[in-house]
């Protein structure tokens, strides 16, 4: 077991607020409240220490795919995001043939059982062809509860979330089925009206998949799903803060109306995250990444992102002007709560996993710890 560590002198963001000249004690894999005499002390003056990031919507990275890759591919993608501060990641699949998705869910479930991923998110195929984004329209289908149940069962207890267009035939019944099985029903890639969205929330939907993207815009006579999702306190809204998916004013609007407690920053990352420009596949769809922006080769729709959560964090503070505490809630505490893992992760408290990120004064990442071990050691510069 690694020696006990005391991270001292940093600005530490706790659930109760930020502590200047604070310290975090790490004993083994957990955060402790007291340090043994032989503990190693690391001076982090001038830095921030924040909880490890939690990404509930991520399709891959490092040139590897969660959607169709092997176990080795998935682990490569997970490691890429860990190097950027994401100590907990849910593996997201995109629209595909049901049998293929079920097989991939089985593979991902094994990795979830091992603790490499925190569960599985199915984004499609039960989405609207009107708002398909980077999903193959030929593979889309209405959300038949029996087929939804097939995917949930294939995940062997590790299905965490399923995105669907709840206005489609079978949508509300599928939401109820997901709620009964403890799986988050997320409204996304939807053409729903305001009223239809409220019905879905009443049926048990609790997440908005990448709010604003792949849904009707807010209108003064047709407020649509955006208004319903922002105003209902039962809903957490995902936001992709990469400067491409959202205008800063849209992000500010979401924070203003939903509040920091109902926002979850996500990456919606695909293979190119942490890897580089070039040609990739997102499910069966060919994607061109240029200057860090991923678009379908056919049609030009935005196709996920190349975002990592350390970049989302820095942008939120330095460009969007959000308080660090609000960003920590959106990038760690809120997604941990959604996953039902907030007893272990999402905040820096004694007894929880020693998952944390060290940022310098400019909010650039310089250290990542996962379960007490350095993934990125701040002492190595």
Image (tube, rainbow, N blue to C red):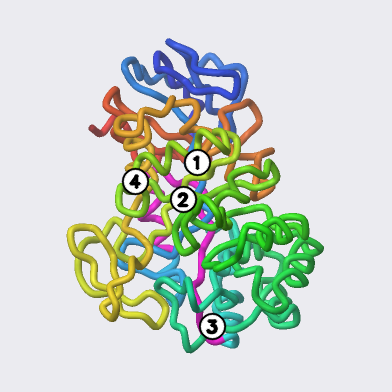
Q: Earlier in the sequence, mark 1 or mark 2?
A: 1
Secondary structure found at label 3: loop
Q: Give the residue at mark 2.
A: 266
Secondary structure found at label 2: strand
Rendered location of residue 123, percent (x, y):
54, 69
Q: Earlier in the sequence, mark 4 or mark 3?
A: 3
Residue at 60%, 76% (x, y): give it. Answer: 126
Observer-side mark, 1 or 3, equals: 1
Circle 4 crowding by C-alpha within 10 Å: few under 14, some 14–19, many from 20 = few
Q: Is residue 315 above or below residue 224?
A: above
Quadrant for the C terminus, please.
top left
Give the Cα separation between the discs numbered 4 and 3.
Answer: 29 Å
Observer-side mark, 4 or 2, equals: 4
Give the Cα separation between the discs numbered 1 and 3.
Answer: 29 Å
Q: Is residue 341 above or below residue 192?
A: above
Residue placed farthest to the right in the image? 180
Whether residue 29 can be seen here: no
Give the Cα separation between the discs numbered 4 and 1.
Answer: 11 Å
Q: Earlier in the sequence, mark 4 or mark 1?
A: 4
Is the Cβ of the residue at disc 1 closer than 8 Å to that at disc 3? Answer: no
Rendered location of residue 254, percent (x, y):
50, 41
Residue at 29%, 56% (x, y): give it. Answer: 274
Res. 348 image quadrant: top right
On residue 254, the disc is 1
Q: Quick one: 335 or 374, which is closer to the camera? A: 335
Q: Give the residue at mark 4.
A: 247
Q: Is residue 379 left or right of residue 282?
A: left
Circle 1 crowding by C-alpha within 10 Å: few under 14, some 14–19, many from 20 = many
Q: Give the residue at mark 3.
A: 140
């Amino acid at each position: 077991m690694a020696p006990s560590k005391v991270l001292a002198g940093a600005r530490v963001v706790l659930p109760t607020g930020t502590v200047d000249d604070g310290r975090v004690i790490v004993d083994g894999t957990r955060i402790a409240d007291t340090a043994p005499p032989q503990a190693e002390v690391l001076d982090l003056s001038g830095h921030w220490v924040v909880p490890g990031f939690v990404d509930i919507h991520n399709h891959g990275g490092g040139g590897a795919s969660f959607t169709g890759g092997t176990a080795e591919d998935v682990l490569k993608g997970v490691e890429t995001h860990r190097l950027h501060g994401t100590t907990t990641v849910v593996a997201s699949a995109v629209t595909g043939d049901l049998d293929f998705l079920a097989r991939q869910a089985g593979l991902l479930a094994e990795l979830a059982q091992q603790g490499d991923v925190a569960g599985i998110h199915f984004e499609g195929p039960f989405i609207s062809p009107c708002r398909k984004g980077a999903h193959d329209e030929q593979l889309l289908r209405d959300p038949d509860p029996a087929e939804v149940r097939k995917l949930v069962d294939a995940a062997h207890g590790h299905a965490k979330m399923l995105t669907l267009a709840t206005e489609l035939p079978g949508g509300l019944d599928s939401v109820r089925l997901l709620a009964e099985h403890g799986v988050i029903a997320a409204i996304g890639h939807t053409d729903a009206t305001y009223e239809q969205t409220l019905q879905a929330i009443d049926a048990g939907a609790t997440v908005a998949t990448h709010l604003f993207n792949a849904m009707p815009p807010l209108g003064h006579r047709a407020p649509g799903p955006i208004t319903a999702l922002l105003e209902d306190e039962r809903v957490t809204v995902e936001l992709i803060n990469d400067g491409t998916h959202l205008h800063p004013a849209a992000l500010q609007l979401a924070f203003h109306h939903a509040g920091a407690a109902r926002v979850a920053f996500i990456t919606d990352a695909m293979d190119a995250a942490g890897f580089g420009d070039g040609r990739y596949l997102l499910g069966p769809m060919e994607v061109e990444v240029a200057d860090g922006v991923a678009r379908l080769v056919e049609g030009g729709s935005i196709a996920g992102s190349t975002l990592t959560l350390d970049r989302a964090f820095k942008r939120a503070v330095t460009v969007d002007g959000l308080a660090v505490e609000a960003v920590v809630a959106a990038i760690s505490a809120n997604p941990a709560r959604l996953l039902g893992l907030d007893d272990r992760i999402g905040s820096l408290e004694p007894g929880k996993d020693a998952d944390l990120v060290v940022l310098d004064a400019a909010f650039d990442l310089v250290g990542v710890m996962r379960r007490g071990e350095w993934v990125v050691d701040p002492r190595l510069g």
